[in-house]
Image (cartoon, rainbow, N blue to C red):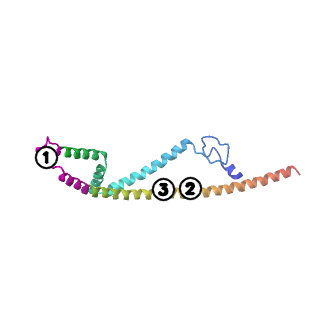
Amino acid sequence: MYVREKIIDKEVLLMSKPKKDLNATPIISDANAERIDRLVDDYKSHILTQLNARDHRETTRSDRLADKVALFAGSWKFIIIFSVFLVLWMVWNSLTLTNALHFDVAPFILLNLILSFTAAFQAPFIIMSQNRQAIRDKHEAVVDFSINYKAEIEIDDVQRHLHHLELQVADIHEMLQKLHSKQTEQQNP
């Protein structure tokens, strides 16, 4: 491991703190870690921007409508509005004060029809939106896989290059030791 100790240079690796143990794993400085995170985020946001642009180009009006209906149907705003509507409907049709204006009496058959219609109407929109989101997620997963695969290839390339450099340094170190031993032999005959 002598060769590896000689290769690791604290200044080249831009260590935040000098290491006492040369065999320890190099630590990247906070500034470099932030820089790397920023580069990765910029790259990912660029890819997501491209995916969003392609998604926008390829979606039809009906797809966007389905997304908007699904977005609204799955929101707290819809739940609150619909809950208020249901309570008002039941209270209006149950109070004796509004007995003359009742339009849907106690089993609330008209309300059941409205609820069934709402469920039947919303379900296809939600399913269409989920299917489109699943396709989009699949595209993003392929992009993530591609990025990870490319990074793995680059890491393997760097490791091969590092191994080659280690071998060269080992050869140089061996030659220096031979040279040093010859010099000591010549000085001490």
Category of crowding for the residue at label 1, using alpha-carbon neighbours closer than 10 angstroms: few (below 14), some (14–19), many (at least 20): some
- Mark 1: secondary structure: loop
- Mark 2: secondary structure: helix
Category of crowding for the residue at label 3, using alpha-carbon neighbours closer than 10 angstroms: few (below 14), some (14–19), many (at least 20): some
The residue that mark 2 highlights is 155
Magenta segment boundaries in residue numbering: 92-121
Find out whether residue 114 is within the magenta segment.
yes
The residue that mark 3 highlights is 147
Q: Residue at x 13, y 46 (%)?
A: 102
Q: Which mark is residue 102?
A: 1
Relative depth, front residue between 88 and 188: 88
Q: Tell me the kind of residue under disc 2.
A: Ile
Q: Tell me the kind of residue under disc 3.
A: Ile
Relative depth, front residue between 165 and 110: 110
Image position, residue 60 (x, y; %): 28, 57
Separation of residues labelled 3 and 1 (CA atoms): 63 Å
Q: Tell me the kind of residue under disc 1.
A: His
Separation of residues labelled 3 and 2 (CA atoms): 12 Å
Image position, residue 41 (x, y; %): 46, 48
